[in-house]
């Protein structure tokens, strides 16, 4: 797929639309609830990913809504062959069945291209020639210090400063970035159903972020916003480690003119070192071969979510009781 021409990026980056007034999105009375679980097929589910899957399923069921599954395989080099089917089997073993077709991001490049073209035409995105090493070197020159878990904030090297200017300065485009507001307009407050009121400075904590990578792959931020909008997702329930992605995703929703969903970020399952349990750090695959294994896995996930213990003897009974006990209504 050919990259879009950068000729459409000549609109003035200083004239970005003002962020919307801060308020917690609330679906209108009588509207349909649609939630989703969106795992990356980099390996089988583990105890931590089951917590996210279960929380999103429980929230959908507690609201009488739909629960969808989307395979986020846009980062194809990290995906393991067959991991998607393993994940779907594990979910089914746990009684978590999707209410519609399973969507694969790797098959949705045209939708992401349309969104990027829309951003480029409106002057909200631009081509970038910088390598990660060059961005890090500019950080060092400016005396910026990257927080341990923070972003390598883009310093704006290729951002056009006026209409008709080419920020590339003769260099070839490698990636495509979404421009964020600067100064007071960059302050982004948002609301989480569990964490409460949150805030982030888009310019100093995130910077202009990538929509399409230098290797030609689509970036997570653009793909997830486009998919959530096209699937009509009203409520996003996911792990707390993804909370800091929310402001830039809401900014993209604003630029693309799509309705913002509500957000609920769940507690993380930590390993013995206090780090997030993850496949990257060797988290054990979830065992779902027997009813006893499934019941124990559900109970452990429920405990991580703060649900009360029950005497349920089967996975289906446990799920029914957990829906009734779900506190986020």
Image: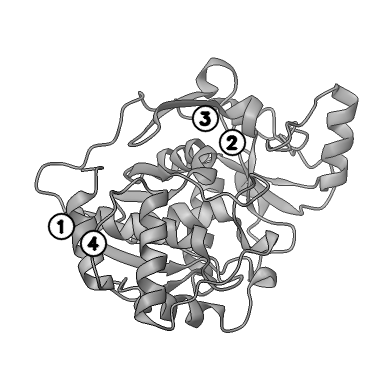
In terms of secondary structure, where does tag 3 sit? loop
The Cα–Cα distance between marks 1 and 4, rounded to whole angstroms, is 24 Å
How much space separates mark 2 and mark 1, taking CA atoms? 45 Å
Depth-wise, is mark 2 or mark 1 nearer the camera?
1
First in residue order: circle 2 vs circle 1: 2
Name the front one of labels 3 and 1. Answer: 1
Report if residue 84 is visible in the image: yes
**Quadrant location of the N terminus?**
bottom right
**Label 3 vs label 2, nearer the camera:** 3
Where is the C terminus found, in terms of image quarters?
Answer: top left
Q: In the picture provided, is 112 more to the left or to the right than 304? A: right
**Residue pointed to by mark 4:** 311
Which residue is farthest top? 184
Point 40% across, 57% down: residue: 301
Circles 3 and 1 in contact, beta carbons < 8 Å: no
Mark 2, Cα crowd under 10 Å, few <14 / some 14-19 / many 20+, is: many
Tag 3 residue: 16
Quick one: label 3, few (<14), some, or many (20+) residues within 10 Å?
Answer: some
Q: Is 279 or 183 nearer to us in this picture?
A: 279
What element does badge 4 sit on?
loop
Mark 2, residue position: 11
Q: Please tell me in which quadrant of the rendered image residue 152 appears.
A: top right
User: Callout 1 environment at 10 Å: few (<14), some (14 to 19), or many (20+)?
Assistant: few
Q: What residue is shown at x 62% (from left), y 27% (from top)?
A: 203
Residue 211, given in percent of the width and then of the height, sits at: 60, 51
Callout 2–callout 1 Cβ contact below 8 Å? no
The dot on residue 207 is none
Tell me where residue 186 appears, x and y as whole percent. 54, 23
Q: Secondary structure at mark 2?
A: loop
Looking at this view, is 156 or 80 the one in front? 80
């Amino acid at each position: 797929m050919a990259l879009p021409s950068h000729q459409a990026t000549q609109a003035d980056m200083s004239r970005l639309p003002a962020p919307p007034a801060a308020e917690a999105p609330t679906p209108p009375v009588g509207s349909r609830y649609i939630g989703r679980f969106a795992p990356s097929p980099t390996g089988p589910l583990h105890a931590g990913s089951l917590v996210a899957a279960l929380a999103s399923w429980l929230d959908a069921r507690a609201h009488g809504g739909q629960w969808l599954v989307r395979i986020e395989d846009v980062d194809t080099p990290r995906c393991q062959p067959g991991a998607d089917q393993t994940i779907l089997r594990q979910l089914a073993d746990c009684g978590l069945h999707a209410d519609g077709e399973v969507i694969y991001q790797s098959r949705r490049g045209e939708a992401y291209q349309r969104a990027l073209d829309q951003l480029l035409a409106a002057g909200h995105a631009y081509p970038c020639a910088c390598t990660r090493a060059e961005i890090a070197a500019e950080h060092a020159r400016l005396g910026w210090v990257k927080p341990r878990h923070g972003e390598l904030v883009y310093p704006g090297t290729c951002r056009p400063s006026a209409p008709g200017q080419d920020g590339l300065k003769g260099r070839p485009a490698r990636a495509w970035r979404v421009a964020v507001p600067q100064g007071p307009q960059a302050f982004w407050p948002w609301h989480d159903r569990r964490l409460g009121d949150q805030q982030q400075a888009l310019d100093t904590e995130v910077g202009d972020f990538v929509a399409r990578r230098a290797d030609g792959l689509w970036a997570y931020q653009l793909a997830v916003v486009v998919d959530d909008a096209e699937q009509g997702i009203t409520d996003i329930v996911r792990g707390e480690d993804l909370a800091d992605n929310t402001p830039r995703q809401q900014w993209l929703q604003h630029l693309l003119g799509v309705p913002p969903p509500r957000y609920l970020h769940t507690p993380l399952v930590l390993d013995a070192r206090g780090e997030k349990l993850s496949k990257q750090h060797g988290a054990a695959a979830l065992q779902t071969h027997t009813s006893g294994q499934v019941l124990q896995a559900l109970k452990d996930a429920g405990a991580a979510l703060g649900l009360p213990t029950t005497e349920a003897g089967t996975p289906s009974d446990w799920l029914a009781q957990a829906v009734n006990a779900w506190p986020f209504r």
